[in-house]
Amino acid sequence: ICGSSTINEPPSSNNFFSSRSIAFDLAILDAQRSYAEFRSNKVSEKISFKLQEGFGLQQENPIERDNELTQEIEEKIFNKLLKLANQELEKKIEENNIEINKEKEWITEEIKKLNESTVFSKTVNTSTQISINGLQSFKVWESCREGQKLCKLAILTVRTAEQGFLARSLINPTNSFIRGEPSKIIPAKFSPKQVLANAGTRIKRDENGDYFILATAISNPKNQTAVSEKIAYEKAKVDAFGMIRRFAGSKIQSKTEKTVDQIYNQYQNGDDENVVLDKFKQETESISDQINIKGIKIHDSGSIIHPANKKLIAKYVIAKWSIGSQSKAINLNKKNKKEKSTSIKSSEPIQQETEIISEESDF
């Protein structure tokens, strides 16, 4: 799924890097909305299937790949939506004194009406948006030249079963390892072009085929004083760690047991869709801040400039997490020395490309 956005500040602006980060976030959100729409259609399809199955109704086109659908849908959220649909359908049956065995056509029609109703459709869509986990930035394109007024960027996002497993493992530690085909060694130091292109959260495999979550964040100091640079570094660190937390998505949100019912009730009361979505996204982020995810480390950090403005220096942090680092962190004694990296590394000279295209992620 693709998302795109425009960097509102020109490269010559001191706020260019901040505006660039916002543009990347908007592009990712654009892709996430499209993915949520696609995913909500799958959810609705499966709810209809499960309702008809529960009432013993024959389907002309039964879903054959039910297991595949289940992999794509966060189980707890789906079960809550299915329970809600059952409750609403049972109310209709009771209100109309329907005998289930004699009125199968009526029940089939009511299932269709429920799935197509505005309130239930919005509930499914909002629930899937806030429950997305494991969505990574697979490839990035950026077109930005010196002197250009507005720069543009696009992101291709991907979600696979392996990514879902990693997202779940962030919250629920596991001893299980997933391995893929061996890939390149993950460099200890990323090139300037890699730093600029690796926006958001990405999955990489190392030479052993082990999966790693990498998150890159950039922040520009207000001025070139040591204090301002330290603040920018700390902000980039917080942002990078936060990206990995958000990758956990639905497992964090599923801690809120009444979420689906609350969403449905708000839409029944006529609340605006954007207001409802914003409220529950804020709740998700609030809950995620309280979750102690072990094993997130700083992989690389330093200074960076953009080829469209070689005078503006920003700080970057690349955070890394894996099932292996989580296991090590859990097993460490609290009294052992904690590794802290507060030094700000110097960046290598930046490459002079005017168009930035990332390498593809591994999945």
Image (cartoon, rainbow, N blue to C red):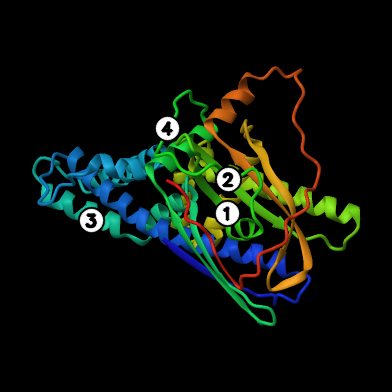
Secondary structure beneath dot 2 equals: strand
Number of residues whose C-alpha sits closer than 10 Å to that of mark 4, classed few (under 14), some (14–19) or many (20 or more): few
Disc 1/disc 4 C-alpha distance (Å): 22 Å
The label number, if any, that marks residue 117 in the structure image: none
Residue tagged by mark 4?
178
Residue at image location 58% in from the left, 56% down from the top: 198
Secondary structure beneath dot 4 equals: loop
Residue tagged by mark 1?
200
Please give left or right for residue 356 compared with residue 208 in the image. right
- The image position of residue 102, as x and y in percent, is 8, 44
Q: Give the residue type at disc 4.
A: Ile
- The image position of residue 136, as x and y in percent, is 49, 51
- The image position of residue 112, as x and y in percent, is 23, 56
Given residues 210 and 351, the one toward you in this image is 351
Disc 4/disc 2 C-alpha distance (Å): 16 Å
Residue tagged by mark 3?
112
Q: Give the residue type at disc 1.
A: Gly
Residue tagged by mark 2?
214
Mark 4 and 2 residues: CB-CB less than 8 Å, in contact?
no
